[in-house]
Each structure stands twice: as C-alpha cells, then as structure tokens.
Amino acid sequence: MQRTVQLLTLAVIAKASQAQPVIDFVTVGAPGNRATVPSEVPDWPGMQVGSVNYEYRISQTEVLVEDWYPFVQAYAPFWNGSVADSRFTSIFIYHDGDQYVMAPGTERYPIDTTWHMAARYVNWLHNGAISGQEWAFETGVYETSTFTQNPDGSWNDQVSHSPNARFWIPTYDETFKAFYYDPDRYGSGEGGYWLYPNSSNVSPVSGPPGVGTTNAGLGTFSQYSVAGQYPDYATPWGVLDASGGENELSETTRSEHFRDRYEFGTSLGTSANFIRFIDRTDWQRPGAGPDGSLVGFRIAASIPQPGGVVLLGAVVTAWGAHRRRK
C-alpha cells in the first residue's frame, strides 16, 4: 500500500545526516487512579477506562518526521520493499535515487505508518537506536517473528509489549489517562476526567493557531501541520496535540482473534463537528490489518531508575500546575 501527497516545496529536498532521534517526554503520575465514571464518558457511559497503576512517560507529541528519519536510514539496509512505500518512509520522506531525504518544512509534521512498522521503531529505540544490526529492529519489545497471518485472515501478533520494555506503543488506558485524567479535576487531590483532551469540558475548535484550538478539521497539509502549535490547550500532563495531528495507534487489541488495535484521536481530515466522538476511540479500518493502515503514534516509556541514563537524548519534560478549565 502506497500513499502520496503533493507538496508545494518538493522542488527543493532537505537532506540531513543520520542521527539518533531526540524525543521529549512528559511523566504521567498519580499511579492507581480510578477509571472513568458514566458522567465523564457520556457517549459511552458503560466505559471504564483510564486506570493505570504505575507511573510512565509518554512522548509530548506524536512521532515526527525528524524522529522517524533516523529510523528510515537505519532500517533501509534491511527493508525489502519499494523505496517509495509510505508504510516504511511515511509520506514526507522520499528516496531521491541516492538516499532517503525529508521534504523541507515537514520535519515537525507527525508521521503515519503501520502498527508493524511502529513496533519495529520501538524495538530499535529499546535496543539503543543502533545501526547495522537487523536484530535490533525485530526483537526486544515486540517479537516480529509473531507477525504472521493465518489462512482465515487472523493474525498471530504478540499482544502486549515485553515486561522489560523501555519503550512501547501506549496502551489504550495509558493514552486515555494521558489525554483526559487530571489529579485535581474536581479540586485539590480530587482526580477525574475532562470530557475533551484539552483540559476542558468545552470541545476543541478547529482553526489555525490563535483562532482555533486544534488543527483537526483543517483538511490539508500546511504550516498548521507542525506539531505543538496549541500549547495552551495541552492535556493536564502537558501532552500536546491530543486533538489534531494524526490518529494514533494503541497497543490494546479490540479483538483477540484478529488482533485489531484501537486508535485514538483526530486528524487534519477529521471534521471538528465530530471531535468529541472521534477523540474518544476508533479502531483500525476493517480488513486493513496491522500492516496496512497508515496511522500516527506516540511512544510510551518506563521511568528511568535513579542514577540511570536517559536514552536517546530524550528530555523528560515536567509540566507545571494543572490548569482548571470549564
């Protein structure tokens, strides 16, 4: 499956040397928080989600082109598909006949890829983002040897990340908590969930920065696609672009048999009229499978042990006082 996009700036190609990604994380605390109650998920009052009994980190933005580019360079020697296959490159990285290059101005656009390729990315991060070693992409967090399909169309993929994983694709509950849960939602120390992922019970408004509160619904790639342009509408933990950007992959399976994974969020192509509905949950397109649906994603990570080294130059970002909105 290939996907292309027209860019006005394609006449000039940005080239960058191979480097390791530098990813900003926020810490999600309040371990042991309760799950949602019906009033907090009025569209699905029976949902009980968001409870996580440990601290973890999550990337402040979705994985960006500049984060994905070093992976493309490192995995290219082991990639057997077309150099133009956007499942591998995303739609903003191209092969110029000599090397992979980023289209200028797209460095901080969120990428979209498949679940299988995102799993290889976190394997690579877990293994130190090394080059020249195929095993570093295929094991550690998700065993890609399990990425096989049965004659009936079902998949055998490893369901959950390995217990010792340092990086992984966030679970449904981890994403939901990072987007909606506020330890001071109902007052100091009285935790709960906002209706929308902007620390608010008021729906995000589609529009450019300074006019709207999300780029969801703007419809086309432009300067408004750059991540992090709505910092005043972050989640209670400081996660940016929880509304807008790209739909996001989750580790959690919707169906044990077919290994469909839940998705989160809205994208440029999502109408603002449906932000409340789609920001809650969606799932991969029926029949697409984990290697066919192009979706963005964030990275979850373990909390570094005292005295440990923060890998990949990652910055652990602290968020200030929780802002109360209505």
Image: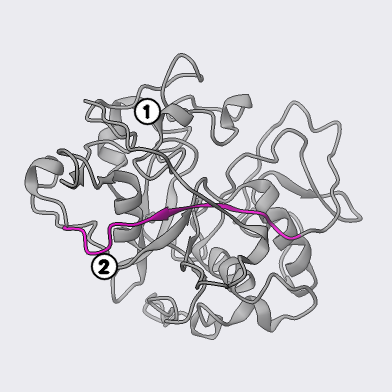
State which quadrant residue 158 falls in: bottom left
Residue at the image point whose x is 34% and y is 34% from the top? 198
Magenta residues? Answer: 20-34
Q: Looking at the magenta stretch, what is its main secondary structure? A: loop
Q: Which residue is mark 2?
A: 53
For numbered disc 2, what is the local secondary structure?
loop
Measure how far apart labels 2 and 1 are at the Cα level. 34 Å
Disc nearer the start of the sequence (2/1): 2
Q: Residue furthest right?
A: 98
Colour scheme shown: one colour
Q: Residue 103 at x, y = what percent?
A: 76, 39
Quadrant of the snapshot with the N terminus: bottom right
Q: Residue 238 at x, y = what percent?
A: 42, 42
Amino acid type for the residue under numbered disc 2:
Asn
Q: Which residue is mark 1?
A: 271
State which quadrant residue 153 falls in: bottom left
State which quadrant residue 12 falls in: top right
